[in-house]
Image (cartoon, rainbow, N blue to C red):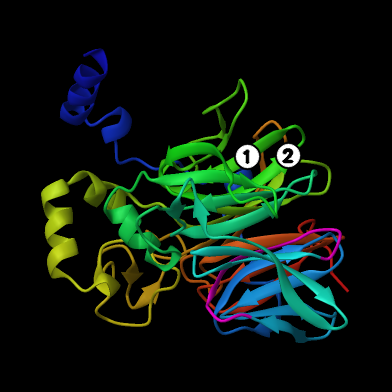
């Protein structure tokens, strides 16, 4: 009863969950052009995800797994469906998710790759929206399913329908079923073992949280300025967190105006919804082309974002100590994955279809 009263007063007063304010980018979040000034290693059509074991860097693009050999991307193997996630462990095993519906562990023998284990159902129900994979220290796979109703490419539909069916799974390859660590998440999108904890990104709740154990449901870092997604281990502890787009007051407002939102979903082409996107500026029909977005025909870097590029550095205690940006007028938006190998940070800009490399400390990477 008390929670219902609080929800009602929040809606009347525009506070709490009903507020449309977004955090200010300041301090460690101060905008920069680190992602736009990063080295472009390759143009990669269908770029989706990255994986590393600390030495090798693998790329998932379309239905192919590629490896960066220091000069170019060379093919490793292909599968029969578009990839939606990839992970690499120290033994050279590559875990891939096929169209969100199957998790497959691939091993190389005699130059040929074959499936060593598969997961297609959990508790008797088929997988639908697997969007991220990560190996833990005990050889198990952490699997996030953004939605149990929609495939990974329909993430925007899940946001605009206020989806809360995401979950975090843990699977030991070879076993017939997986353990459910967390359910009812607002679009789970990325998980990582950090010390003795398991972190999971909850995109529509704008937070990275702990899963399982006594700290269940406790936020590691909340009220983020963007929608967090896949994570990668960072040197010195903690994690790099990719945010595939930033929040805006207009989108927050639309999410709370249920009548308008339902009509928009029913009557407007999804390409032109008032919603986040991995890239923008390609059509004059897109929303947010007026008002503060352009002034005298020039797109301003501080304009309200429809698409944006952002990577956060989270310390083990959840503090944000560094951020890497591609601002509104930049070119490397829709960052969906990061991977650190040695001093280099590899970044997947899915919106631009580019593989990037930079040193997060600002030094030149050989």
User: Is 77 situated left or right of 130 in this image?
Assistant: right
User: Is 136 situated left or right of 199 in this image?
Assistant: right
- The residue identified by callout 1 is 199
Picture quadrant of residue 173: bottom right
Q: CA distance from mark 1 to mark 2?
A: 7 Å
Query: Which residue appears at 84% of the width and 80% of the height?
Result: 69
Please tell me which residue lies in front, 82 or 45: 82
Q: Do the residues under discs 1 and 2 have CB atoms within 8 angstroms?
A: yes
Upstream in sequence: badge 1 or badge 2? 2
Could you classify mark 2 by the number of other residues whose Cα lies within 10 Å: few (under 14), some (14-19), or many (20 or more)? some
Number of numbered discs visible in the structure rendering: 2
Residue range (magenta): 79-92
Query: Which residue appears at 58% of the width and 80% of the height?
Result: 63
- Which of the image's four quarters has the N terminus? top left
Say what secondary structure mark 2 lies in: strand
- The residue identified by callout 2 is 194
Picture quadrant of residue 48: bottom right
Query: Which residue appears at 27% of the width and 81% of the height?
Result: 284
Please tell me which residue lies in front, 151 or 330: 151
Magenta-drawn stretch contains 212:
no
The x, y position of residue 38, in whole percent, is 70, 71
Say what secondary structure mark 1 lies in: strand
Q: Is residue 298 visible?
A: yes
- Which of the image's four quarters has the C terminus? bottom right
Vertical placement of residue 1 versus 99, above or below: above
């Amino acid at each position: 009863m008390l929670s219902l009263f609080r929800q009602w007063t929040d809606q009347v007063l525009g506070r709490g969950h009903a507020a449309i304010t977004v955090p200010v980018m300041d301090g460690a979040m101060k905008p920069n052009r680190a992602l736009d000034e990063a080295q472009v290693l390759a143009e990669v059509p269908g770029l989706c995800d990255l994986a590393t074991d600390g030495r090798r860097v693998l790329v998932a693009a379309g239905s192919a797994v590629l490896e960066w050999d220091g000069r170019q991307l060379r093919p490793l193997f292909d599968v029969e469906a578009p990839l939606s996630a990839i992970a690499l462990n120290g033994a050279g095993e590559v875990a891939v998710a096929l169209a969100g519906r199957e998790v497959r562990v691939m091993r190389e023998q005699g130059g040929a790759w074959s499936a060593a284990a598969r997961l297609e159902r959990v508790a008797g129900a088929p997988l639908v929206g697997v969007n991220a994979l990560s190996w833990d220290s005990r050889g198990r796979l952490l699997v996030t399913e953004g939605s149990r109703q929609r495939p990974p490419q329909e993430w925007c539909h899940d946001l605009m329908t206020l989806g809360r069916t995401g979950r975090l799974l843990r699977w030991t390859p070879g076993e017939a079923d997986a353990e459910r660590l967390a359910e009812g998440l607002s679009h789970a999108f990325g998980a990582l073992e950090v010390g003795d904890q398991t972190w999971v990104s909850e995109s529509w709740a704008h937070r990275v949280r702990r899963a399982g154990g006594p700290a269940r449901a406790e936020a590691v870092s909340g009220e983020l300025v963007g929608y967090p997604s896949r994570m990668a281990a960072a040197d010195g502890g903690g994690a790099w967190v990719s945010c595939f787009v930033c929040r805006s007051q207009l989108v927050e407002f639309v999410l709370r105006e249920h009548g308008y939102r339902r009509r928009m979903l029913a009557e407007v082409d999804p390409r032109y919804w008032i919603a986040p996107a991995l890239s923008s500026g390609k059509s004059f029909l897109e929303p947010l082309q007026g008002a503060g977005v352009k002034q005298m025909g020039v797109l301003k870097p501080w304009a309200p974002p429809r698409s944006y590029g952002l990577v956060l550095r989270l310390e083990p205690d959840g503090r944000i100590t560094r951020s890497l940006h591609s601002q509104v007028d930049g070119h490397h938006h829709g960052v969906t994955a990061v991977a650190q190998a040695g001093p280099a940070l590899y970044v997947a800009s899915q919106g631009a279809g580019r593989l990037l490399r930079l040193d997060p400390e600002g030094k030149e990477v050989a």
